[in-house]
Amino acid sequence: MYIYAIDDIELADLGMSPALLTSDSDDLGFSVRRQAGIASQAFTGGANEPAVYSIVFRCPSVAVRDSLMTVLTGDLGTERRFLAQRLDLERTRVVGYAGLTDIERVGETDFVAEFEASDSVWTSESSVVFEQTISSSRDQAILVTPPGNVRTTPTIRIRPLVQRTAFQSHTGWTKRRRYRIENLADEPMYRYPVRIDLGDTAALVVAGKLQADGDDLRAWIHGMEQRRKLFNVNTTATQLWIIVSVILPGEYLDVDVVYGNPAATAPDDLLYPDDPAFAMSASTNASWVYRTDDIIGNIGGGLWHLTRSTAGGIADFGVPAAWQPTQTFDNPDARDKTQQPRSSPESGAYMASFLSSRVPYNNNATIVPNDFDGVSFYNPLGITSVRGQFYVENVGGHAAFVILQRDSSAEGWDKIFTYDTTTAGATITIATYDIDGVSAKWVALATWPKNGISIPDAALATDAASAKLTSDTTLAIDSSKMTITLLVDAILPFTPASLGGSLRAFYAADDIVGLADNSGVRQWDDSSGNGRHFTRTTDFPNYNSDEFSGYPAVEFDGNSEFMGAEKLVADTRDETVVVALR
């Protein structure tokens, strides 16, 4: 260790080199002959018993020596302040205190002084602050190497920051509830629609804590407002829907639902096609999931950029077992508008470690965010009605597309419609299927591997749900009828060859090339090779250029449209009439 200054006397100002501690020193708690090494190994210190420092001062002249000795002996025994440099890797400046007990000349210009201190504690030259912004639950460790040669007990100061675009961004919201969604599955949840059951909001309206239209009820994730859809506000069964970006398996996401702002105006709702989100269920099947479109406006809607920060209250803690980076508001229905930090030791989530080169033991504090009233999210698979466009692919074997329904969540699933594919790798199409009935039904869509086994008819599990939504979706609620429309992006062509040798006529409306939309189809040519062509001059069907999702069609409305004569083929054998779109 080198001594640089005594009280206010800088040795360099006297033309002197730093003074050295000699081996005659005693009870230092550290080695005076350090060559190299890590501070915690070669420079321990920390002894509480009195220490003796023997220091050699090498002066440039007799005059300097005599002057410095006079100063040191002027008030014998007075405690002096020493500024020294540790021989650690960073050459840290430290401060110690000792009083002169003996002094004697050495050689022509040098002298050795002996000082005694009450202990061997050397402290930092000045207060050192290590600062880190905690923005994620993964920020679990800070490496701190405080100066000095003793074991240290740092103080951790937690100052929560509130993100806001302006000074008053959070002002006005006086109430808050915290909810948590946990991913207990073994797959990530990407762009996952979730529902919060808020319960009785009518009581909040009566108590003056919530606007009657719910405009002040918002969802915040990490301080950012999310687009949301609110249902049944001012009732006893209010629901709030949001879209979360991602939750990895085994992890969770906390969402703050805030309210109690009478000045709030209407917020941003979910964008199409995620509106309403409750018709977008997600399966846990590894190969297939329902998919919501990537509408960027539904993630971080109303984003508050951190252009200004306002600090909350300060909470100081000692170490160990006191690092609690979980800062929450007061109780959910706090009466005041002040955001106060609150920390308490809890367990069961993750470990936060405080590391220091001279902390006497490794300190781990087990902490978890405050889960507040403990209400968790869930995403029900059962829905009351849906209207959408789907397609089903058969991957690697026979499969069947199944539509299920049940009257309530307590009942088993009943199969109400099945479309079975017959060829491996085939793509199937269903135009529409209507379910009549005034009462609301829970409806699910699924595919089951067939492999020669019959599809079950009752109590069907929905874990293997594998319908895949690929196109823009229009969702509508109709209490009297539910329509499911399924669309394929490539229709397998039908060919006359599939009828084998029984083919006697195959008619094509060959005059539709260049035919205007909604014009009559008059000419029908037989493509079987048997030459049974015919034309119509009256009562003909109409050609529609965009009848089925971009495909043309010939329309027979069932009144007075005909293809040809009463009998297409004049014999008595069984016949099959096929109308094909191409």
Image: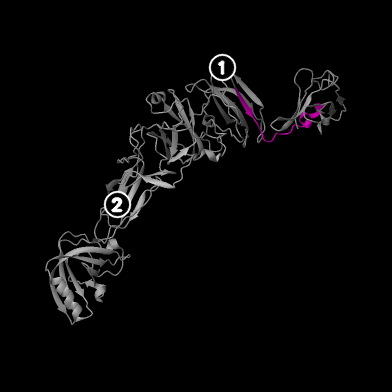
In this rendering, the answer to whether 142 lies above or below 479 is below
Between 392 and 499, the one nearer to me in the picture? 392
* Place of residue 573 in the rendered image (x, y in percent of width and height, measured from the top left): 81, 19
Q: Is residue 358 above or below residue 467?
A: below
Image quadrant of residue 350? top left
Q: Of 252 and 455, which appears nearest the observer?
A: 252
Quarter of the figure with residue 389: top right
Q: Which region of the structure is painted magenta?
A: 482-503
236 vs 442, left or right, is left
Q: Is residue 549 above or below residue 94?
A: above
Query: Local crowd at mark 2 within 10 Å, few (<14), some, or many (≥20)?
Result: few
- Circle 2 SS class: loop
Residue drawn at x 29%, y 64% as measured from the top left: 92
Q: Amino acid at mark 1?
A: Val
Whether the residues at callouts 2 and 1 have beta carbons within 8 Å, the answer is: no
Lower sequence index among marks 2 and 1: 2
Residue 389 forms part of the magenta stretch? no
Front position among marks 2 and 1: 1
Residue 362's mark?
A: 2
The residue at the far right in this view is: 531
Which numbered dot is residue 438? Answer: 1
* Disc 2 to disc 1, C-alpha distance: 66 Å
Q: Residues within 10 Å of mark 1 (few under 14, many from 20)?
A: few
User: Mark 1: which secondary structure?
Assistant: loop
Instruction: Give the residue drawn at x 80%, y 31%.
Output: 516
* Image location (x, y in percent) of residue 398: 63, 32
Q: Amino acid at mark 2?
A: Asn
Figure quadrant of the C terminus: top right
Image location (x, y in percent) of residue 211:
43, 28
